[in-house]
Amino acid sequence: MPEAELEHVFEPYVRLEASRARHTGGSGLGLAISRAVIRAQGGEVTLSRRAEGGLRARVALPLHGRQSTG
């Protein structure tokens, strides 16, 4: 995945793999929903490229339900 797409994929209905047909599954909502749920809990989710190849998804959530102030 190109670096420029790492944030774009969190937008609703974004699907980067053009070879997949709509009828075979996936609507491009999974990452948008995940980010919304995580942010509602005061957390954050990010994607980054790994030197070895592939992606790393990082989810950070506050401890004990405390919201982050900054």
Image (spheres, grey):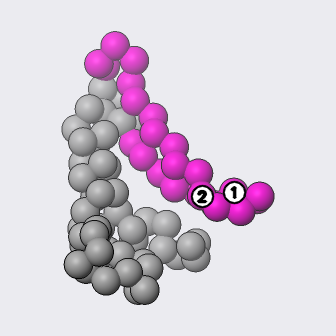
- For this rendering, which residue is in front, 19 or 45? 19
Q: Which residues are magenta?
A: 44-66
Q: Relative to 58, say whether 32 is above or below.
A: below
Q: Is residue 9 left or right of residue 49?
A: left
Residue 7 picture location, percent across and down: 43, 65
In magenta segment, residue 62? yes
The reply to whether callout 2 and callout 1 are in contact (CB within 8 Å) is yes
Residue depicted at 31% across the width and 83% down the height: 21
In the image: residue 44, left or right of residue 33: right
- Horizontal side of 60 relative to 48 (left or right) equals left
Residue extending furthest front? 24
- Three-letter amino acid code of the residue under disc 2: Leu
Name the foreground residue: 10 vs 54: 54
Q: Quadrant of residue 31?
A: bottom left
Q: Quadrant of residue 62?
A: top left
Which residue carries the number 1 mark? 50
Residue type, label 1: Arg
